[in-house]
Every structure is written in C-alpha cells, then in structure tokens.
Amino acid sequence: MAFPAAAFHDLQGRGVLISGGGSGIGAALVEAFARQGARVAFIDIAEAESRALAERLANDCAFAPVFLRADLRDARSLAGIVDQAAAAIGDIRVLVNNAARDDRQRIEDVTPESWDENLSINLRPVFFLAQAVAPHMKRAGGGSIVNFSSIAYLLNMGEIPAYATAKAGIVGLTKSLAGRLGPDDIRVNAILPGMVVTERQKQLWLTDAAIAAMRDKQCLKHTLIADDMVGPCLYLASDCSARMTAQTMIIDGGVL
Ligand SMILES: NC(=O)c1ccc[n+]([C@@H]2O[C@H](COP(=O)([O-])OP(=O)(O)OC[C@H]3O[C@@H](n4cnc5c(N)ncnc54)[C@H](O)[C@@H]3O)[C@@H](O)[C@H]2O)c1
C-alpha cells in the first residue's frame, strides 16, 4: 500500500478500535494505524481475510493488530466486544466506525425485515459502539470517533434506499454524539467517501464503465482507492484536529 507521507506522532501507542477492518477501506485503515505505531484492534465477521491481515502485519508493526471476530448486527454484544478490545490494547482513544454493507434493493422489494437487517449493520452499530466506547474515552481523558458515511445519500441513488438512509443518519448521529460527548473531550466527525474501488466493489457492483464515468465527474481524474481514505482518517483521529468536531469531510475527488 501507499503510506501517507505524514507521521502522526501522537498516534504512537494509542488505542484504536476499527469496525469492519478485515477488508477494503477498513483493512487499509488497520494497516495505516498499525504502521503509525498505534495499538489497533479490529472487529469483523470475515474470519479468513481478517486473520490473514492480522498475520501479515504481526511481525511488521510495533504492536500486532488484534482481530476480534464478531457480528456487528448483534447490538447487545457490542459492549462486551469493546471491553475485550480494551483488555487487549489498553485505553481506547480512537473509534473508527467503518463497517457497512451496501446491498442494492429495488424499492418494491424492501420489506420491514430487510429494512431492519440493513440498518442493523449500516447504522445501529455506529451508535452502540460509540455508546460502549465513550466511558473508556472519558476515563482516558478524551478521544476521537470517526464515522464512515458516504456521498451516496446525496446522489439520488434509487437502488440503495436503506443504505442511503443509514448513511444520512450517520451524519445526524455524528452531530448528536458530538454535542453530548464534547464536554468529555470526545470528538465525533464523519468522512463521506466518493466511489472507492475495492476488490469487493469490483466483484459486486463496479464495471470499468461506471468507474470511468465517476472519474469523469471528479475534478481530480484519479480513481479513488482505499488508501485515499487513510490520510483524512488519521488526521481526524490525531490531535492535529483537536478542535474539530461535529464535522463532515467529503473525500470524493471533487464530485460534490
Ligand atoms: N467503497 C466505496 O466506494 C465507499 C463509498 C462510500 C462510502 N463507503 C463507506 O466506507 C466504509 C468502508 O467501505 P468498504 O467499501 O471498504 O466496505 P466493505 O464492504 O469492503 O468492507 C466492510 C467490512 O465490514 C465487514 N462487515 C460487514 N458486515 C459485518 C458484520 N455484520 N459484522 C462485522 N463486520 C461486518 C466486512 O466483512 C468488511 O470487512 C463503509 O462504511 C462504506 O459505506 C465506501
């Protein structure tokens, strides 16, 4: 992977918990935080990919990232997972809510069950992980929560009604959490990626034509990859953004 030119010295030794760290953008974040010297734990349901990532980084980083296998849809288990993470990495000072599943669905096919299922991965864990992590951060003197939303909810994309709702909800939730947690020096911000070409996106949804069409719309004529999300996320996690909270950062190459 390409590494960010900047070293964020305050992230050395810092406890960082990342949801959905086993693949895609999350895996790039696990690697980047680990290479900054952070003490990283990540939650994922994809066992093989996650173990392979943890093993690949184990000998390469000052602190080997810790993989915690869990299904984020099980909201009641999340406080226990956060406690496990804290036991493994020490004080959690950074939470990256990255996990998601961008299932396509025609409006006619949405059922109450499919709607709840979608939000149970795309929105609910964002709140419950933040709720569980907040006391740890408060005890540690503060922290930073970075929530991954998406520009998708701003683009009238009809094929993802529940996902778009969740991603809009994450922005509202970011502001609400920032208001409540600010007095404890816990900052909460959101990143809205544009089209980021990961292996999964290529396998499931993205054709070469769609990638080229998005690149045409961007001011910057580069296809976005997972590593492009790393610098903004490290910045929001680090004390470099110490007085920034309740904000959204769009990283889309200049579409919006
Ligand atoms: N890739 C893009 O183009 C794009 C664009 C806009 C926003 N985003 C956002 O960025 C974030 C990362 O996107 P990505 O493309 O890397 O996603 P991805 O689908 O490739 O990876 C998500 C990770 O979450 C894990 N996960 C899914 N369901 C889970 C569950 N129930 N329990 C535990 N882990 C689970 C997956 O195993 C995977 O490792 C997401 O929040 C996504 O909405 C991505």
Image (cartoon, helix red, strand yellow):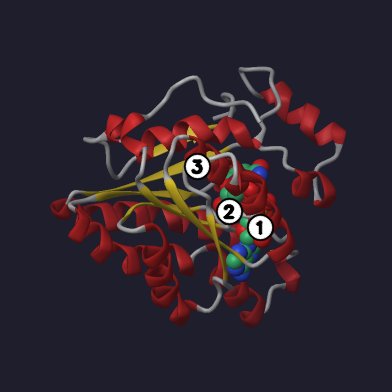
Q: Residue at x 18, y 49 (%)?
A: 185
Label 3 sits on residue: 34
Q: Nearer the viewer, mark 3 or mark 2?
A: 3
SS under mark 3: helix
- Ligand 1: which quarter? bottom right
- Which is more N-terminal, label 3 or label 1? 3
Q: Quadrant of residue 132?
A: bottom left
67 left or right of 169 in image? right
Look at the numbered discs 3 and 2 and tell me whether their residues touch, using CB distance below 8 Å: no
Quick check: can you spot residue 156? no
Q: Residues within 10 Å of mark 2 (few under 14, many from 20)?
A: many
Q: Looking at the rendered structure, which numbered label has been put on residue 21?
A: 2
Q: Where is residue 232 drawn, in percent x and y? A: 46, 32
Task: Tell me where residue 221 appears, x and y as whole percent.
Answer: 69, 17
Disc 1 target residue: 50
Is there CB contact under 8 Å for labels 2 and 1? yes
In the picture as drawn, the residue positioned furthest to the left comes out as 183
